[in-house]
Amino acid sequence: MDKGKRSRTALRKTKRSAKSKLPAKPSTLTNALDMAAIAEERPTTSDGKETKGGVSVVARFRPINKNEKEKGSKLKGALLEISDDNLSVKFTSESKKELKIPDSASRFTFDYVFPTNSTQAQVYQQTGASMIGELFAGFNCTILAYGQTGTGKTWSMMGIVGTENAGVIPRLVENIFVGIENADVNIEFAVEVSYVEIYLEQIKDLLHPANSNLRIRETSAGGIYIQGVTETYVTSNQEVLDIMEQGGNNRKVSSTDMNAESSRSHSVFILKLTQKHKIHGSTKESKLILVDLAGSEKVSKTGATGQTFTEAKAINKSLSALGNVIKALTTGKGHVPYRDSKLTRLLSDSLGGNSKTCLIITGSVASYNAEETLSTLRFGKRAKMIKNKPKVNEERSIDEYKALLEAAYKKIRDQENIIKALKEEGGYSSGSMRSEDWEAAMSAASSSETTAASDSNNDDSHGGEGRGGELKQAGKTRPPAPILEISDDDDDTEGGGGEEPGEEE
C-alpha cells in the first residue's frame, strides 16, 4: 500500500525498549524524563542567559573557494575576526575602511559563530541537538538556513547523508527515532512527514510533483497548514531519509557562475510528531519545520539569464518579503506582512508565533563577497531580536483532569487532618493554646465580627434589618470559601505534561 495513503485513524506503534539507555551526549537523550527536564528549562544562549522565547541565531562561514581566489582580494589581511568565545564576529580595521562601516556597526553578536574549519557535528550540537527535547515536550520547532548563494546552506542542512559530513536534518531525524525507541512504553507515537518547495511563488509537492500551486490554510486555532499536500507516515529513520532523497531529486536546481548546483527554490520539510499516553489519554502534537532557503544573489555575479534570471527575481523578492516581516516584528509595527509571499505565510508560526526557532546564517570570508556577507550579518542581527511565543501543544484527557482534581482534594483532606491533629495536641503553630481556648477565641472573634457587621448595616440603612442583621440573628458569620491549591508536585505525581510557557515580556 502507498505510504502516502496509509490510514490516519490510529497511532502507529514503534518498537522500543523500556530498559535501554542512550549515551549521555548533548546530541541524544537518555530517556523521556530527560526530554521533560529539557522542556522545563528556559531556552538559553551559549553563556547561559535566557533568550525569553527569542530566535536563536548562529553564523557559519565557509572557506574561500576557487572562484573567489581567482577574483582576488582588495584586502591585504582578513575580512573578519571571530572572538575567542565564538559569540561575536567583527570586520577588521582594513575591511571597515573598504566597506565604509562605522565602528559601532562593525561587530555582530550571535548565539554562536562557527569558523571556516567547523565540523557538521559541531554545527548540529549548537542548533539541532536541543530541539529534540523541545519537540518531545510538545513544542513546535523550526530551523532555517539563510545566506548568499553558494555559502553552504544546503551543506549545513543536509550534507552527505550516512557519513560524518551529514548535516543538521539527517542528524535530527536519527535522534528523533532514537528518542522514540527509548521513550516511556506507555506512550504511542506517530511520525508524519511532508516535503514541499516554493518555486516562482508556487508551492509544489516534492513527494507528488503533480500537486502544484498548493494553498496555505489556517486552522481554527490559528495554526498554518498546506492544503492537499502529501503526508506520509514513517516508522524509521531510513524511511525519512528515503523520502527526503526522493523529494530532493524533484527540487529545482541550476548552475550559475556562483554555484554549480544552485537551489532555485525554497525547500520546506515538515515532520509532525504525535504522542498519546495510553494510561492518561493525553495527547501532544508538535511540528518540526526545516527550511533550506534559496540563496540571495546578484545577477551581475551569477550571470543568470532567461529562466534562471526569472528564478533569481522570484527568490530575491520572497527574501525581501522575509526581511520586511522581520523588520515589522522587531520595530513594533502593528501590521506584520506575512501574506506578502508564500514563504512568509508558511513561516508565520516560526517567526513571531508558536515555535522555538533557530536561524543559521551562512557567509563567505572573501573580500569579493564582503557586501553580501555584511548584508547577511545584518539580517541575522535583526532576526535575533524577534520574540516568539512558544507553548506546549497538549490536550489532556477528562480522566487526567479528574486525577488532578482528586489530587487537589486529597491535599485538602491531608491539611484538614494536620489541623485536627494540632488542635488535639493543644494548639496550632505555637503549641501554647489549648484546643478549648482556641475554640473560645474563635467564637468570640466570630461574635465580634457579626456584631460589627450588623452595626454597620444598621447605620447604612438607618436601623433597617440588612444582611448584617440576619447574620447577627443567626449567631454566626458565614465561613470563607475554601481555596484550592494545586502544586507543581501534584502535576508530576499524576503524569501531567508540565507547565506551559506563555508569552514572556
Image: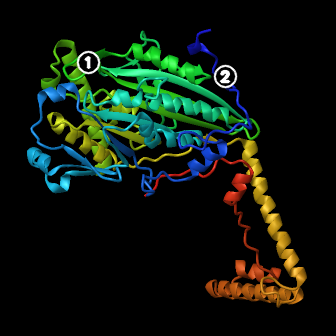
- For the residues labelled 1 and 2, the Cα–Cα distance comes to 45 Å
Whichever of callouts 1 and 2 sits on the residue coming sooner in the sequence is 2
**Residue bearing mark 1:** 260
Q: Quadrant of residue 296?
A: top left
Q: 227 or 194: which is nearer to us?
A: 194
Q: 330 or 96: which is nearer to us?
A: 96
Q: 392 or 341: which is nearer to us?
A: 392
Q: Residue at x 46, y 14 (%)?
A: 246
Crowding near the residue tagged with mark 2, few <14, some 14–19, many ≥20 C-alpha atoms within 10 Å: few
Q: Is residue 50 visible?
A: yes
Crowding near the residue tagged with mark 1, few <14, some 14–19, many ≥20 C-alpha atoms within 10 Å: few
**Residue bearing mark 2:** 9
Above or below, 181 against 330 in this view is above
Secondary structure beneath dot 2 equals loop
Callout 1–callout 2 Cβ contact below 8 Å: no
What is the tally of numbered marks visible in this picture? 2
Q: Select label 1 or label 2 by which is in front.
A: 1
Q: Residue at x 12, y 24 (%)?
A: 300
- Position in image of residue 317 (x %, y %): 23, 29
Secondary structure beneath dot 1 equals loop
Q: Is residue 334 visible?
A: no
Whether residue 456 sits left or right of residue 70 in the image: it is right
Whether residue 462 sits left or right of residue 361 in the image: it is right
The image's mark for residue 450 is: none
Whether residue 429 sits left or right of residue 375 in the image: it is right
- Position in image of residue 14 (x %, y %): 68, 26
